[in-house]
Image (spheres, rainbow, N blue to C red):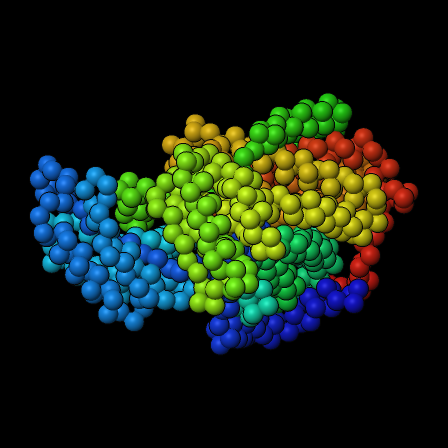
Amino acid sequence: MKNLVVRTARWSAAHPWKGIVGWFLFVALCLGAGIAAGANAATTEDYRIGEAGRAESMAAEGGLQQRPVEHVLITRAPGAGTSRSLSGTEAPAAAREVAAGMRKLPEVRSVSAPARASNGAALRVTVTMKGSELDGKKHLDPLLAQTRKTAADHPGLRIEQTGGPSISKGVDGLRSDDLARTEKVALPVTLITLLLVFGSVAMALVPLLLALTSIVAAVGLSMLASHVFPDAGVGTNVILLIGLAVGVDYTLFYLKREREERARAGGGLSSAAVVELAAATSGRAVVWSGLAVALSSATLYLADDVIFSSLATGAIVVTVVAVVSSLTVLPALLAVMGERAERRAARRAERGTRRLIRRRTRPANGNGEGRGGGRLTGTVLRLVERRPAAALALAVTGLLALAAPVLGISLTDMGRETHPRSVAAMQSFDRLNAAFPELKAGHQVVVRADADRADQVARALHELAREAESDPALGGKPRTRVSADGRISMLQLPVPHHVSTDEARSSLERLRDRYVPHTAAALPGAEIAVTGDVARYVDYPAHQKQQLPLVVGSLLLVTFAMTVWAFRSVVLGLVGVLLNLLSAAASLGVLVAVFQHRWAEGLLDFTSTGSVGSRVPLFLFVILFGLSMDYQVFVISRIREAAQSGLPTRQAVMAGVRGSAGVVTSAALVMVTVFASFAALHLIEMKQIGFSLAVAVLLDAFVIRLLVLPALMLLLGERSWWPARRAPALPAAPETPLPARIG
């Protein structure tokens, strides 16, 4: 297997059209298989976590699980007079009309009697739909049509519909629009960046083409994988986010090396031979990088959460497909393009332009590596070479300063009220909660006991409700429900506060720590648990914090093991872990400083929640570690090559960093472009993820790889390779035969 990379490239270069056609057939097969199998969406059961999840499972046993609920809100139409009151008979008639229409729909389970707001300014009809809580948005259209029909019949009233299904449907539409807008921005900017890097339209289109086809294939494969790891609806997002970044990067690493080898050969090697040399160096680095990203992403499965499992599956699939594309179809494309370039060069030579051809193919500095990133990069590296200790101290101090805000991080699950008001259902949601504050949130106390204890359970829950009536954070009328078999009972307590407020969270604490224990004492042997909107909101971040040490510990171990395995150096393994920790902490610190405060709201177009989404840090941490390995493997591979050529480690460090600076900078610009485009999304968590990843890549490419890594390796010297005395070869180093020369 150790020669697999080179053998694959050699075959593709020798049979380019078979390789190209085979790749597109593979992409079509993946997509077709995925469509045929269909995606397996996560169910309500997959989201159950902590005590809230346990209570929901108990409720579901008795058929008391949460159902999709919609509310039809009736208020006076804007401009229809100064009075807010719904006096007269039109509003009640409209409420009866919409209720009657809803009851006829097969999607509807039950319809409540119209309820009037305490100030008389609104009427509400509550509609409970059939099916599971997550399926409501799939069957929403007939309900919306009925609401629109009633509204058209009563132009003097504002009749609108909102609820969990409506909001979910609106958010999904907004997410789709945002992603389409992101593609329109990211793709052209990425193409322009590649044009600047290569100066050739054909060469710039190759990375973009392979990235897009990799994304298409990964979407199909992820649909197949969803039958093992259910899709939480975020898989396509992460495939696009990661796929465009790594797909372009891996191709870029390979292309830049192929051009260097072609320039170094000065026209003396065939295209197939040049491609084979690139495969033996950058191709191998791409394999290690992709493996690192995939293994790092796999640690997300340890979070024991369907959303993170979906994220992990998408990241792994698209990364592996991107690696396969760079090892199979890319050599074939380069061989075809190289052969055409050779034919053009031969025709020019026949016209007496041999000198021009030699000048165009001559290496920029005689060794095929160019000047490595331009004048600014050269200046920075010279300063690092002269004063490595000072450069290291300055860079680390700066990164630690950026990381400092992490100490004050506040993690919360992003409640429904954080969704953008550009979603029409959210505007109705605000008006509904203003008229009926008891609908903002709720607690559900679920009890499981033998059926013959149903009366005893009912008395205990009645006493709990009476005790909770004096709680200032609770309001509205409690409601008790009992399963048909009498084994499951549920007490519903309205909370007139949004789930993200201190009042809502403190009411949950009192319920769980004070009221429920009293009830449990009165019901020995019964099982009691609390769920509801607030409990879900609180239990999810708590679960993430509980799993965080396991995920992070596994991630550090994977990063260390991968680096040691790749470079046979314990020292570099420790260096990789420390630098990735430093980079991740700094980017998290910037994220906290920007999103937990209000100073950047206008700049980035968001409304601060005073917190960071509970999923963001863990996802950022894992993905950043994987992406950082891209640059780490590529840069250290170049350093190792220089050391193996006979240079002392100090000189090899500078030669390797200079030789890789140009491609690392170009790759970073592409990644930052992709990630920054996600920072323009409306959904706050996606905005936070895109922003933090863009910052992380900037710090990693321009601070860690240009300042911290070279300074640290200069100070370590030959000790960098410990326990070896000199730079060892990669364990999978292929024994490449001498390529054939042209002519």
Residue 393 falls left or right of residue 135: right
Residue 100 falls left or right of residue 481: left
Residue 687 falls left or right of residue 564: left
* Frontmost residue, 298 versus 361: 298
Can residue 662 be seen? no
* Frontmost residue, 237 versus 646: 237
At 90% across and 45% down in the image, what residue appears? 724
Can residue 317 be seen? yes
Q: Position of residue 698 (x, y in %)?
A: 58, 38
Q: How many marks?
A: 0
Q: Vertically, is 199 above or below 743?
A: above
Quarter of the image that includes the C terminus: bottom right
Quarter of the view holding residue 411: top right
* Frontmost residue, 456 versus 567: 456
Q: Position of residue 20 (x, y in %)?
A: 57, 71
Quarter of the view holding residue 650: top right
* Frontmost residue, 620 versus 399: 620
At 50% across and 46% down in the image, what residue appears? 535
Q: Position of residue 268 (x, y in %)?
A: 71, 59
Quarter of the image that includes the N terminus: bottom right
Q: Position of residue 111 (x, y in %)?
A: 28, 61
At 14% across and 41% down in the image, what residue appears? 85
Residue 466 falls left or right of residue 12: left
At 52% across and 60% down in the image, what residue appears? 453
